Structures are given as structure tokens and as C-alpha cells.
Amino acid sequence: MKRTPHTKATVIIVVTLCLQLGVQAAKAQNQQDQHHSFQSRSEGSVAGEDHGMVGEGDKPVAKLSLDQFERRGMNGAAIEGDFSYGDDVNKVVLEVDFERGGGETEKNERWLVYSRSISKDWNFLAGFRHDLQRETTSRNWLAIGLAGETPYSLEMDAVLFLARNGSTAFRLEGEYDAKLAEKVSLVPRLELNFFGQNDEIAGSGSGLSQIETGLRLLYEIHPKFSPYIGVHHERVVGNAADFAREEGEKVYSTVWVIGFRVWF
């Protein structure tokens, strides 16, 4: 597909965002005493637990986490989890991100990522993402990005994707854990998906294409297990919304959710 000036502008914006996040990661090293791990928001620190610096990791360990395992509305579901193996500095992560709603699979991603701690709060990510879609065409992406925690305890993932055919995409995720009581937390979450080109088959449009937001109320029964209830909203915008209307599909949906978060 021929690239337009709008497509080039989108790619430039994406690269600029990644560079800005990299600068912020370096600054965050001297501003926080907490630590973050890519494989689970529930697992704690990644590196520099004693000195706040990146150094040699501890003995490698295997961990399994489910950040989301939920029912969405009457006929939807979502599973987001990962298995990781490594130490505080280096990890290999296998991740699954699955969403289904409206009688069809909306997202079915498999990730294989190498995670390298670059500061006590940020990790560099490099690996592959495979989109497994029966309704549309499956696709493989090269993934490069950052994951960590900002000075205001906002957990973020920013990942740039490049497909073999030259297609580009960018995903920005943010989550904040607001403690309401010792065992009760309110967790707002935002996901933005950008694309460098139109893809009518996949239903994505150039520029900002998809927005997902959610608000979940968690109760910590055990440090490793928290059931929750909440609400989830998603919509397509721009060219993606035009494609959806042409197919007679809704451009947004809001549903209740019930599920749990667990890690081992």
C-alpha cells in the first residue's frame, strides 16, 4: 500500500513518543524507590532492589500471572496473562492477550519478548507478536518498546510494531492502582492503538484507530489473588470507525466486567 504524508507523520509521532519515554525512563532512576516488572503488575520490583541500580540479577525464577481473567457483558470475555522466566535484570516472557465480544474474536495475540532492565523502574522490550485471527488474516509483528512506572506511579507500556509488509503500529497502555483501603483498590486503565496505514480487512485505520478504557474495583483476598468488578468501554475512531459503519458494526461498546487477578 502506498504511504501517504499522513502515514509518515504518524510514524514520526510514534518514534518521538518512544524517545520521550526513553528520556523519562532515565530521569525516573533518581526519583523513585519502587520497582516495576514487565511480566506482572502484581509482582513488585525488577532490579536494583538494594541499591536502586541495574546490576547482576538473582537466581532465575519462573512466574505465572493473570492480570485479567474476566467475563465481559453477556457474551464477551478477556484473558491477559503471561509466563516469565529470568532474574531481576533479564527475562523471557510469553504473553497472551485475548478478547472476544459480539460473537467474534476481537483480539488474539501471542507475544514472545525479551525484557531487559535499564533502570530500577523501566525495562526495554524486544520480541515478536503474532496476531491469530480466524475471521481475518493472521500477522506477525516485530515489537520494540518500554515498560515501567512514571514518577507518579502510573504504570505504562509503550510498544512500536513493524510487520514484514512494512505496516507499522504503536500501542500505549497506562494503568494506575489507587488504594481506597488496605485491601481495596480502584484501577483505571487506558489503551490507545495507532496504525501507520489503513487496513480494511483488519478494521484498523491510519492514525489513532482504537481506544479502550476500563475501571475495575479490586478486593485483595490474598496478596496473590484479587477478584474484581467493573466496567469496560471501547471504541474505534477515524477511518476505523468508517470501516465499521460500512460493515454495519457498532463503533463503540460499554459492558460490565467481573473477574479476577492472580499470580504465582
Image (cartoon, helix red, strand yellow):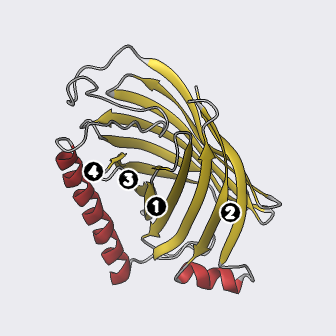
Spatial CA span between label 4 and label 2: 40 Å
Q: Is residue 12 left or right of residue 71?
A: left
Sooner in the amino-acid sequence: mark 1 or mark 3: 3
Q: Nearer the viewer, residue 17 or 40?
A: 40
Q: Can I make out residue 163 in this image? A: no
Q: Quadrant of residue 167?
A: bottom left
* 4 or 1: mark nearer the eye: 4
Q: Which residue is mark 3?
A: 154
At mark 1, the secondary structure is: loop
Q: Which residue is mark 1?
A: 165
* 4 or 2: mark nearer the eye: 4
- Residue 136 circle label: 2
Q: Residue at x 55, y 39 (%)?
A: 95
Q: Would you say the residues marked 1 and 3 are in contact, meaning their CB atoms lie under 8 Å apart? A: no
The amino acid type of the residue labelled 3 equals Leu
- Residue 151 circle label: 4
- Residue 101 circle label: none
* 1 or 3: mark nearer the eye: 3
* 1 or 2: mark nearer the eye: 2
